[in-house]
Image: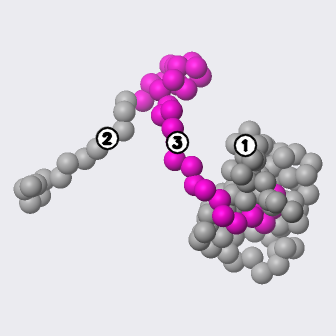
Amino acid sequence: MMERGKQKFQYLPKAHNNLTEEEAAALMPKETLEVKGELPCPCCGYITIPKGGEDTAYICPVCFWEMDAFLQSEDEPSDQNHGLTLNEARENYRAYGATLERLKQYCRPAKEHEIPHK
């Protein structure tokens, strides 16, 4: 039992500033927590949005569209998405593979279970 006023804190490991990419990757956890999608992303259409994620600031890992619960139409600029409309983001995804070309580096390909069955 903890004494009143004393707390046990868990600290992050020390930062290593001079590592190569390979060395840094080796320090990363082998398994990462991945959220299972249940709903299609409104931008790319892949099943990447978790239940409840459509109402929060969840970012699709495939196209990098950030969910915006305040959008009233597909042609309204989104504050969450650099002022892009959903239609503009869809066009960009078709052209670049991301909502913005510069965000492509953060996107990943859709996984087999995220491809919607038609």
- 42 in magenta: yes
- The quadrant in which residue 96 appears is top right
- What crowding class fits label 3: few (fewer than 14 Cα within 10 Å), some (14-19), or many (20 or more)? few
Label 2: element kind:
loop
- 84 in magenta: no
- What crowding class fits label 2: few (fewer than 14 Cα within 10 Å), some (14-19), or many (20 or more)? few
61 lies above or below 72: above
- Left or right of 40? Residue 9 is left
Reading the image, the residue beneath label 1 is 108
Reading the image, the residue beneath label 2 is 11
24 lies above or below 103: above
> Which kind of residue does numbered mark 3 sit on?
Thr
Labelled disc at residue 32? 3
Q: Residue at x 75, y 64 (%)?
A: 40
Pointer 2 or 1: first along the chain: 2
Residues marked 2 and 1 touching at CB (< 8 Å): no
Pointer 1 or 3: first along the chain: 3
Whole-number angstrom distance, CA of label 1 to CA of label 3: 14 Å
Residue range of the region highlighted in magenta in the rendering? 15-44
The quadrant of the image that shows the N terminus is bottom left
Front residue of this view, candidates 38 and 28: 38
> Which kind of residue does numbered mark 2 sit on?
Tyr
Q: Main secondary structure of the magenta part?
A: loop
Residue 57: x %, y % from top left? 61, 65
Q: Residue at x 62, y 63 (%)?
A: 50
Residue 117: x %, y % from top left? 82, 60
Q: Residue at x 75, y 47 (%)?
A: 112
- Looking at the image, the residue that sits furthest to the bottom is 72
